């Protein structure tokens, strides 16, 4: 049985095509969306630290200071003037990025507009927060202050740490 050159060429071509399809280009959005979510989180986490540092009763640069009437008052009487309490994405933007809009796809409080469905929100407390960013199908989050940045495509695992309950 003799193999003709064109048959051998066809077999080689099919093998190369199969390998190219198997190893071929992956959707760029997956890797770039993950990187974008982590980058967005990298912008907001330092702002969260600044919020906590400045969120003190009657502090000169208190981020959630309110002026409900003719005299200025703070949230001290309502318990919002410590740690991360009272923190929202809007407050972070207005205090630490004046003139710029709230980052699209970033949340620090389950009450923030557009908080993703399926994500277990962690309401900011005196000692804990969970910042969440989403880009495409990827989520990145940091449960803090001591947690590390994590990422996943599954909304159900966001802000989840075994044994943690704020």
Image: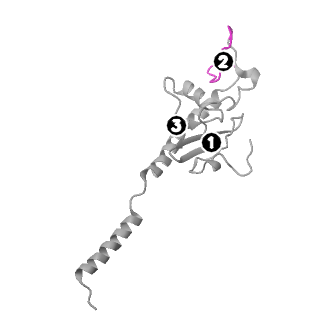
Badge 1 element: loop
**Which residue bears the numbered disc 1?**
117
**Nearer the camera: disc 3 or disc 1:** 1
Q: Does the magenta stretch include residue 61?
A: yes
Percent coordinates x, y for residue 57 in the rendering: 71, 22
Q: In this view, does 76 lie above or below 8?
A: above
Q: Distance between the residues labelled 2 and 1?
A: 30 Å
What residue is disc 3 on?
43
Label 2 – label 3 distance at C-alpha: 25 Å
Q: Please give the name of the residue rendered at 39% of the width and 58% of the height, measured from the top-left corner.
A: 25
CA gap, disc 3 to disc 1? 23 Å
Residue at position x 61%, y 43% from top?
A: 142
Q: Which of marks 3 and 1 is nearer the N terminus?
A: 3
Q: Where is the N terminus found, in terms of image quarters? A: bottom left
Instruction: Decide: few, some or many residues near mark 2? Use Cα within 10 Å; few <14, some 14-19, many ≥20.
Output: few
User: Is 43 placed left or right of 1 in the picture?
Assistant: right
Of the residues under marks 2 and 3, which one precedes in the sequence? 3
* Residue 56, percent from left and from top: 69, 25
Image depth: mark 2 or mark 1 in front:
1
Position of residue 116 measured from the top left corner of the image (x, y, whole percent): 60, 40
Q: Main secondary structure of the magenta part?
A: loop
Residue most extreme to the bottom: 1
**Which residue is identified by label 2?**
66
Query: Which residue lies at the image location 55% right of the left edge and 24% below the top edge?
Result: 94
Please provide the residue range marked out in magenta. Answer: 58-71
Label 1: how many Cα within 10 Å (few below 14, some 14–19, many 20+): few
């Amino acid at each position: 049985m003799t193999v003709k050159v064109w048959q051998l060429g066809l077999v080689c071509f099919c093998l190369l095509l199969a390998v190219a399809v198997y190893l071929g280009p992956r959707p760029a959005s997956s890797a770039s969306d993950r990187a974008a979510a982590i980058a967005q989180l990298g912008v907001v986490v330092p702002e969260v630290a600044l919020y906590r540092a400045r969120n003190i009763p009657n502090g000169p640069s208190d981020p959630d200071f309110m002026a409900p009437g003719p005299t200025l008052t703070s949230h001290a009487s309502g318990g919002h003037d410590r740690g991360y309490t009272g923190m929202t994405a809007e407050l972070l933007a207005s205090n630490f990025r004046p003139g710029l809009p709230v980052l699209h796809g970033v949340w620090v409080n389950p009450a923030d507009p557009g908080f993703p469905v399926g994500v277990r929100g962690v309401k900011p407390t005196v000692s804990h927060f969970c910042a969440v960013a989403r880009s495409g199908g990827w989520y990145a989050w940091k449960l803090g202050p001591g947690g590390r940045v994590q990422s996943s495509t599954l909304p159900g695992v966001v802000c989840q740490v075994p044994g943690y309950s704020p």
